[in-house]
Image: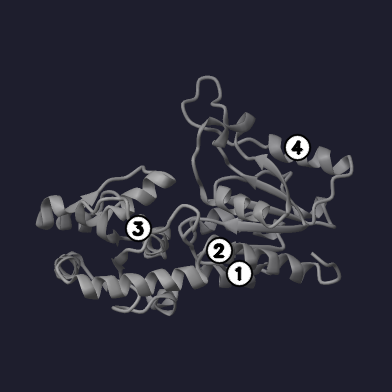
Amino acid sequence: MKIALFYASWEKFGEPWSTPLGFKWELESRGHEIKFYNLYHAEGDILPRHTVRTYSSASWNQFHADYAQGYRPDAVLVMDYGPFDCFQMDRKYFPDVTFVLEAGDTPQSFGNHAVKARKFDVIMTPDKQAADRFTTMGVQGVWATHHGDERIFYPRPSVSVLWDCVSTCGGRRVTAAISKALGEQFNNERYFFGNAHAERLCAGKMVFQCSQFGEITRRVFEGMACGKMVITDRLPEVTQMHTLFEDNEDVVYYTDAEDAIEKIRFYASHDQERERIALNGYNKVMKHHTVAKRVDLFEECVKKCRPQEVI
């Protein structure tokens, strides 16, 4: 299958890993023909007088030119957490190409994705409610919850366990309370990427997560993929989180800081029970929630849109 893949990349400047890059590796490993278009300006170069990477419509201008010259991908896959849009990005200009949006950071970025939803045939989203809302808008919404990229997140026995509990979710009221109670046994630092992030998660007996918006979060899956027991906040039932991981079997849910502190202390000193839950979570992620499984879903979406073709 020929795929035109759009995402914002700084790989040229040493970006070690990202969710879209993981997709690209998996697609290429399956023999798909990938043509990459960078949503960042000039392959990620920083614009004059700017100190941050900047989006640009140049990639879509190039795709229009390539299409005019005979390039015919089977599918366009756009992976973006919400902010990018331009009028050139629209399936109406390419009637023989299936358009798929992987809408990252939903539900918090739903509004950004919604304004461009009708430009796509299919929208894959990590949020169940968002998938249903896209479908009511007349676009096929597919619930593709987060995953653990098995090329990066996997058990690392060589990494020394330094803390009872480790987190990379940054400052929250609940993490401040936990840090005060547990002291140096609770490590919470941010801005680790790729292998460095995986190694950080492996340095704790367990991985702690706290959502910002009551949403399913990627670190839950990444922590489990690293072979660690994950303790995370109990989410509303509408998220369907409980259908993915069972409490005290695959994951440990907490209701508030006091509950989290009590459970962290308990599982830090009960190795056998902690490892049982960690193994269950790991097995479930490896079976259902890897990048390979998400690419399977993408391929299925394209096939449903192109039923007369063998892909």
**Which three-letter amino acid code belongs to the residue tagged 2?**
Thr
State whether residue 169 appears in this view: no
Where is residue 263 drawn, in percent x and y?
Answer: 18, 70
Q: CA distance from mark 1 to mark 3?
A: 23 Å
In primary-sequence order, the first of circles 4 and 3 is 4
**Which three-letter amino acid code belongs to the residue tagged 3?**
Gln
Q: Residue at x 17, y 72 (%)?
A: 270
In primary-sequence order, the first of circles 1 and 3 is 1
Label 4 sits on residue = 61
Left or right: where 298 falls relative to 257: right
Label 1 sits on residue = 142
Where is residue 210 drawn, in percent x and y?
Answer: 30, 60
Q: Is residue 151 above or below residue 126?
A: above
In primary-sequence order, the first of circles 4 and 1 is 4
Q: Quadrant of residue 238?
A: bottom left
Q: How many marks?
A: 4
Q: Residue at x 14, y 66 (%)?
A: 265
**Which three-letter amino acid code belongs to the residue tagged 1?**
Val
Give the number of the disc on residue 125: 2
The answer to whether marks 3 and 2 mark residues whose Cβ atoms lie closer than 8 Å is no
Q: Residue at x 37, y 75 (%)?
A: 280
Q: Quadrant of residue 185?
A: bottom left
Dot 1 surroundings within 10 Å: few (below 14), some, or many (20 or more)? many
The answer to whether marks 1 and 2 mark residues whose Cβ atoms lie closer than 8 Å is yes
Label 3 sits on residue = 212
- The secondary structure type at the circle numbered 2 is strand
- The secondary structure type at the circle numbered 1 is strand
The answer to whether marks 1 and 3 mark residues whose Cβ atoms lie closer than 8 Å is no
